[in-house]
Amino acid sequence: MIRASLIIGAVGSIVLAASAVAAESGPELPPGPGRDLVYGQCRTCHDLQYLVESAGVPRSTWNEMIDSMKQYGLRIPPEQRAKILDYLGTYLGANPPPKTAAAAPAPPAEGPVDGAQVFAEQCSACHQPNGKGVAGQFPPLAGNHDLFLSHTFPALVVLNGMQGKITVEGKHFDSVMPPLNVLSDRKIAAVVNYVRSAWGNSPPVGTAKLEASDVAKLRKAELAAAEVHARREKLKSK
């Protein structure tokens, strides 16, 4: 109970801004249903090391921690919250399944990917469901020309994150986007294709859809977040 109280009390010291998130991928969480949601929603504000070091607390404590995040602006649908709690309570809870048992089942084949759903689970916490972002913190995707700097640039950002000062629609941002390289190639391609046509965005004539095979090639580069920013500056100077 003492440890649980300390963890709950530590929540108040967390800074909910992208600039507080490390650019590196950080520790890898145990595989299991809901892990992608935890990466997408929790890493917005937390270094994942915080979650790893909190492992072992009971499900009720994780439940209280998620509730406490509401005062810092956490807004997620009930079904997402339930999945996140199930993951944290199971794989980072008091009685996690043995690693060998967790790794034994073959992962299910990935079905059709809905880019809108991937966005809702992984991106909306920062960029907002309407794609308008948060002033001074998270840039908008609606009307953001960075989406069309090159055929593959947005996927580079999703895979590797980005760090550095940028200006979007005349507004300045200086924060860190964490890499979402835990997502499959198909999910990354789907979410890029979705945001390129959502909220009034319109790909230039002749723009081909991003394919999973394109993302697979980009994944091999393993760029640093600052290098992605440098790539952006080079593309914008053309």
Image (spheres, rainbow, N blue to C red):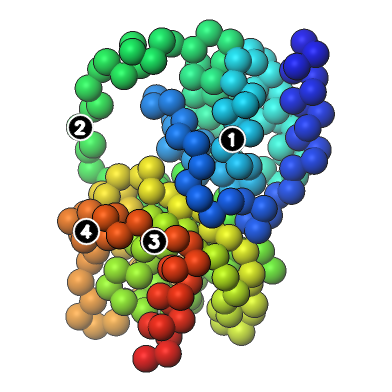
At numbered mark 2, what does the secondary structure look like: helix, strand or loop?
loop
At numbered mark 1, what does the secondary structure look like: helix, strand or loop?
helix
Dots 2, 4 in contact, CB < 8 A: no
Query: On the rendered structure, is 198 left or right of 92?
Result: left
Residue type for callout 3? Leu
Label whose residue precedes the other's in the sequence (2 or 3): 2
Specify few, some or many for label 4: CA neighbours under 10 Å numbering under 14, 14-19, or 20 or more.
few
Label whose residue precedes the other's in the sequence (2 or 4): 2
Rounded to the nearest angstrom, the CA distance separating label 4 from label 3 is 12 Å
* Residue at 50% across, 50% down: 24
Label whose residue precedes the other's in the sequence (4 or 3): 4
Front disc: 2 or 3: 3
Label whose residue precedes the other's in the sequence (4 or 1): 1
Mark drawn on residue 223: 3
Any part of residue 94 in sight: yes
Query: On the rendered structure, is 207 left or right of 116?
Result: left
The vertical placement of 62 against 29, above or below, is above
* Residue at 76% across, 35% down: 11
Q: Which residue is mark 1?
A: 49
Please identify the quarter of the rendering in which residue 153 is found.
bottom left
Dots 2, 3 in contact, CB < 8 A: no
Rounded to the nearest angstrom, the CA distance separating label 2 from label 4 is 21 Å
Nearer-the-camera pick, 104 or 221: 221
Residue type for callout 1? Gln
